[in-house]
Amino acid sequence: MAFPADFVWGAATSSYQIEGAVHEDGRSSSVWDVFSAWPGKTYNGDTGETACDHYHRYIEDIALMKDIGLKAYRFSIAWPRILPDGRGRINQKGIDFYSRLTDALLEAGIQPWATLFHWDMPHILQREGGWLNPATGDAFAEYARAAGDALGDRIEHWMTFNEPQCFIGLGLESGVHAPGLKLSAPDLIAAHHNHLVAHGKAVDALRSSRGSDRFCIGYVPTTRALIPDTEDPALVDAVRSAFFGYHPVAGIPWTLAAYTDPVFQGTYPADWLAANEQFLPRGWQTDLDGIAGKTDFCGINLYSGERLRFGQNGLEMVKQPSGNPQTANKWNVEPETLRWAPYFLWERYKKPVVIAENGLSLSDWVSMDGRVHDPGRIDFTRRYLLELEKAIDQGAEIPAYFHWSLMDNFEWAEGYKERFGLIHIDFSTGKRTLKDSARWYGDVIQSNGTILHT
């Protein structure tokens, strides 16, 4: 049992969560700037105005990445820094920041993996309808081309969208995330389809920019894993089917397959289509060719899952026992999340599956000895990585794992309440402290995972 010799060990962040400097060097407002300034929308009224101040302290942060021993760093580019008007004029100062960041990563021997959209849409485009407006897809492609032209000579790995279920479901349906809307099913399905069209256009734009023959491009949804409670082949088959089945939640397209099937197979799943075809834009069928077959890997963000078994009426959820292990934000600890979900994805699409996010929130603080002791994070990550190794041993092609997150950061509507980082951030002073988990993760990387078994 072993991870591949060339396995990529990394950590991840996103622009609005760490950069700060929201008013500097020509950056325009994003939907999250506007939303987090709206009283009552975030915990404690927190915003990303300063966050981790990574915009000014990226050299220090890369030194810490090197100290940990990261092989790769997944970060997102802020669309409002590159195209402050959403389209058209390119802001050279924004380009320059990501160019400096990329150069510094490469100098440190760390692979840059860039995500184009981690939720911070230029507010000016939201005022034009955001993902409800098909023209936003053209603007997104223009942005992708600008990023590819500027950085594509040095960045090979790209991801288009991060967790579309969240910026659609939480941002447009429940309104608990930016831009804070509560839309009906027809609008939600239109936004869903428009973002998929935008994905296809962005891939084309990246491919047409320089260095396109070297690009490895992915798409990153999220999901809760469905886990068979036993190894019974019949149960595994049933859980696999349920994992890709349609489970409507308040009218939004939460089924994973409604996101991944169009990207990797050029179809919408039949059960989802039966319920939602009436809401799709006219001519949606002709869009599928532009969405499908262009994406090199399936990224996936995985944190937790639900165990299933056979009951009297078919599959049923296994009730969690009292006092079951939970993270600080009350997500169930289910290590087999990293075995079954990646394996099912690889089986279905035969594309490499990249774990683009995995981690947990804990109540961390700096102890009297000046260190941050987080044994829970070490234990959690070890358990999950051992299950990921099983998926690889079963035959799944899984080339990379990114821990979420590199550092404590602005956790969206939860503000600075939740700490997911390998690096502790004092948000009053900006001081960085490597947690025990960061040093342990460095040992995992150096051993290519072999210490997980000791």
Image (tube, helix red, strand yellow):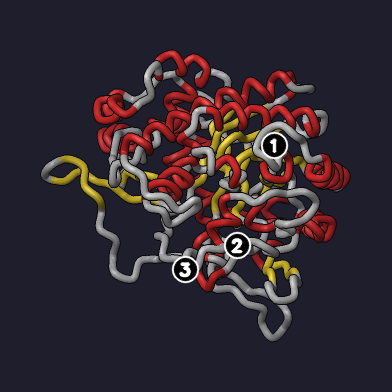
CB under 8 Å between discs 1 and 2: no
Q: Answer yes or no: is residue 74 visible.
A: no
Q: How much space separates mark 2 and mark 3, taking CA atoms?
A: 16 Å
Residue plotted at (69% across, 25% down): 206
| Up-down relation of residue 183 to residue 233 (above or below) | below
User: Where does label 2 land, which residue?
Assistant: 410
Question: x and y percent of residue 129 in the render?
Answer: 49, 38
Residue that extends furthest to the left in the rendered view of this protein: 312
State the SS at label 3: loop
Q: How much space separates mark 1 and mark 3, taking CA atoms?
A: 48 Å
Mark 3 burial class by Cα count in 10 Å: few <14, some 14-19, many 20+: few
Mark 2 burial class by Cα count in 10 Å: few <14, some 14-19, many 20+: many
Q: Which residue is nearer to you in this view: 402 or 172?
A: 172
User: Where does label 3 land, which residue?
Assistant: 40
Task: Indicate the amino acid at tag 1.
Answer: Ala
User: Where does label 1 land, which residue?
Assistant: 5
Task: Indicate the amino acid at tag 2.
Answer: Phe
Residue plotted at (75% across, 41% down): 112
Mark 1 burial class by Cα count in 10 Å: few <14, some 14-19, many 20+: few
State the SS at label 2: loop
| Up-down relation of residue 171 to residue 36 (above or below) | above
Q: Which residue is nearer to you in this view: 342 or 251?
A: 251
Q: Quadrant of the C terminus?
A: bottom right
CB under 8 Å between discs 1 and 3: no
